[in-house]
Image: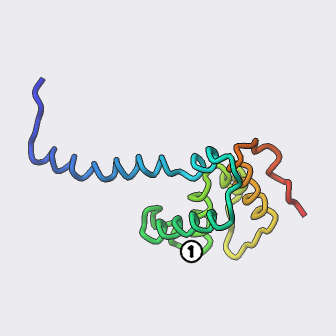
Amino acid sequence: MEVNNSPRNSNLLNTLKPLIILGFIFSLLSTDTVLAKSRRPVTDAETRQKKQECYADIESGLWGWQCRSSTTEKENCALRCLSPTCYDLVYGSDPLEEGEKDLARSQEYKYCIYKLSMGESLEGIKGSFDY
């Protein structure tokens, strides 16, 4: 078998290496994975810190232009970044709309993150804070 070590292949590999490494690190640091393994309740401070990191990623363009297109889109992306599992459960079928403040779903989302951090079942979260 002959290996092609042309400059073009080398440049492509050098370009892809950081992306592959970044993807691997991101998958290891995924909030759902970290929270699920902790078996202790996540604190509000930890959640705020992670959400600020999500906002920074969004602002840097890692989440694409749509996530920067409006304040509401940015919030939807930050919630998805913080916990894809909880976002899908609480907001997935009905994302936040412009100007919407949904206290019930916000509480469900926080409760989901808490239960996820404790490794508990996420059953019964949807609709648990309907007022």
- Image quadrant occupied by the C terminus: bottom right
> Residue 128 lies in what quarter of the image?
bottom right
Q: Is residue 40 above or below residue 67?
A: above
> Residue 74 lies in what quarter of the image?
bottom right
Question: Which residue corresponds to the image point at 56% horizontal and 74% vertical from the top-left?
Answer: 70
Question: Which residue corresponds to the image point at 56% horizontal and 58% vertical from the top-left?
Answer: 81
- Asked whether 29 or 17 is in front, the reply is 29
Q: Residues within 10 Å of mark 1 (few under 14, many from 20)?
A: few
Q: In this view, does 5 lie to the left or right of 52?
A: left
- Image quadrant occupied by the N terminus: top left
**Colouring rule applied to residues:** rainbow
- Asked whether 113 or 69 is in front, the reply is 113
- Asked whether 65 or 84 is in front, the reply is 84
Residue carrying label 1: 70
Question: Which residue corresponds to the image point at 64% horizontal and 49% vertical from the top-left?
Answer: 85
Give residue 50's position: percent from left, percent from top.
57, 63
Give residue 91's position: percent from left, percent from top.
70, 57
Q: Is residue 104 left or right of residue 27?
A: right
SS of the residue under disc 1: loop
Total labels: the figure holds: 1
Residue sitting farthest toward the right: 131
Identify residue type, mark 1: Ser
Question: Which residue corresponds to the image point at 47% horizontal and 65% vertical from the top-left?
Answer: 57
Give residue 63's position: percent from left, percent from top.
47, 62
